[in-house]
Amino acid sequence: MEIKSAVPILDPSSQSAKQSRLFFIDNIRWVLIALVICHHAAVTYSHVGGWYYFDGPQPPPLTTITFATFETLNQAYFMGILFLLAGYFVPRPFDTKGFLKFTRDRFVRLGVPTLFFMLVIHPFVVYWLLRNFDNPAIPPLARAYLPFLTSGRVIGATGPMWFALALLIFCVLYGVFRLAVKGSAARPSLPGHKEVIELMLLMGACSFLVRITQPIGKSIENMQLAYFSQYIVLFIVGIMAYHGDWLLRIPYSFGIFWFKLALFIGVPACPLIILTSGVLHGDSISLLGGVHWQSAVFCFWEAFFCLGMCLGLIVLFREKFNRPTAFSAWMSQNSFSAYLFHTPLLVAVTLCLKPVDAGPGLKFALATLVAVPLTFAVSGLIRTRIPGLSRLL
């Protein structure tokens, strides 16, 4: 999740430019992490997806479809663009530090927070927070912690930190690749419409093939392989983008063209695909994976929407939101800590709202309005008040 490395901002060919900071990427990052919190709040009230706590009964079909559309649109791109941005900041620190220091740094910055989540935050949420305020049938923390460790359940207890673990694996594999393949990378040419379409077809085809055996919803130790072809491809694209200075060179009109396609074609197509896939009649399997036309359509729509959003957000933030403010700098500094700590804070907020007599839509709005600022505020305090933690997070 680290997006802090020095990167080019003015003239990509100058050394001084490469020591500057791309503030628009900082802003993309904290906005997306705020959206992650909002997304998990939606899962809480929709019962669509996996999360620690579901509030109330399953909502009525129209509400469920509305939530599902919102979550599907998010899932189609927001983790993918984070992998792309993460990949962008991999080559330079590797070139500067070398394999051993680079991998050690990534283990510290990504592995340690992930272990902290697995060993502390996850059992706290499940065996204390949920037990005391939702389900007393769950065994207490003192009795459950040792079996939690010895049974191997801890391995899959990464929660949302699966992202950091996956990114750590990607970085190590990149380091091994660099050791095996000597020589400097050639500067890739700027992609055009043809390359975007080819990448879209590649991502869609790979997702379809993977989902034949690994449908959406199936996970291996909390890793949903159904989405990983997108993540791997975009991580590699991020590396190529660094070598080609694509984030600075992509024309604004080019990115906005694809952004408009994603908004005006991709967004309305999403609920249509959901509604025509048979989900309302209990046939969600065809959409989620397997050798079904519904899965194929969904995979290629997902790739189309993802690339349109990635291109659009990059050029939009670069041109319109590339200046630091006190607020944006604070949000950016605390974005990774907010990602790490948002699980217990969001669960606590939604548990507090449990007695509120309101529909799932209103409770979702309330939970989001409270949880997002609360998470960044509390996470910021934790990061700055505990000695040494600010360097880690």
Image: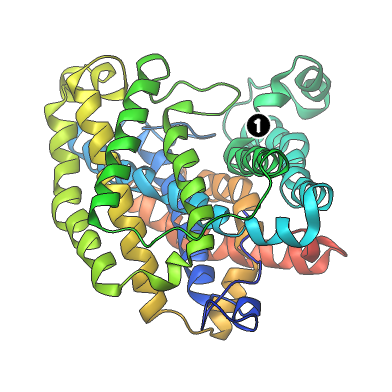
167 left or right, relative to 206: right
**Mark 1: amino acid:** Val
Quarter assignment of residue 122: top right
Q: Is residue 353 visible?
A: no
Total marks shown come to 1
Q: Where residue 207 sits: x, y (%)?
A: 36, 29
Q: Residue at x 42, y 27 (%)?
A: 226
Q: Position of residue 213 (x, y in %)?
A: 40, 14
In the image, residue 119 sits, relative to residue 66, either above or below, namely above
Q: Secondary structure at mark 1?
A: helix
Q: Residue at x 53, y 43 (%)?
A: 351
Of 207 and 132, the residue lying toward us: 207
Q: Is residue 137 above or below residue 246?
A: above
Q: Find disc 1 in the rendering and name its residue.
A: 126
On the rendered structure, is 35 left or right of 292? right
Nearer-the-camera pick, 141 or 52: 52
Res. 289 in view = yes
Task: Rate crowding at label 1 as few (under 14), some (14 to 19) or many (20 or more) other CA atoms within 10 Å.
Answer: many
Residue 279, how many percent across, how many down?
A: 20, 24
Residue drawn at the location 83% of the way across and 21% of the way down: 146
The residue most toward the front is: 183
Q: Seen in the image, is 293 located left or right of residue 233?
A: left
What color scheme is it? rainbow
Position of residue 133 measured from the top left corner of the image (x, y, whole percent): 61, 37
On-image quarter of the C terminus: bottom right
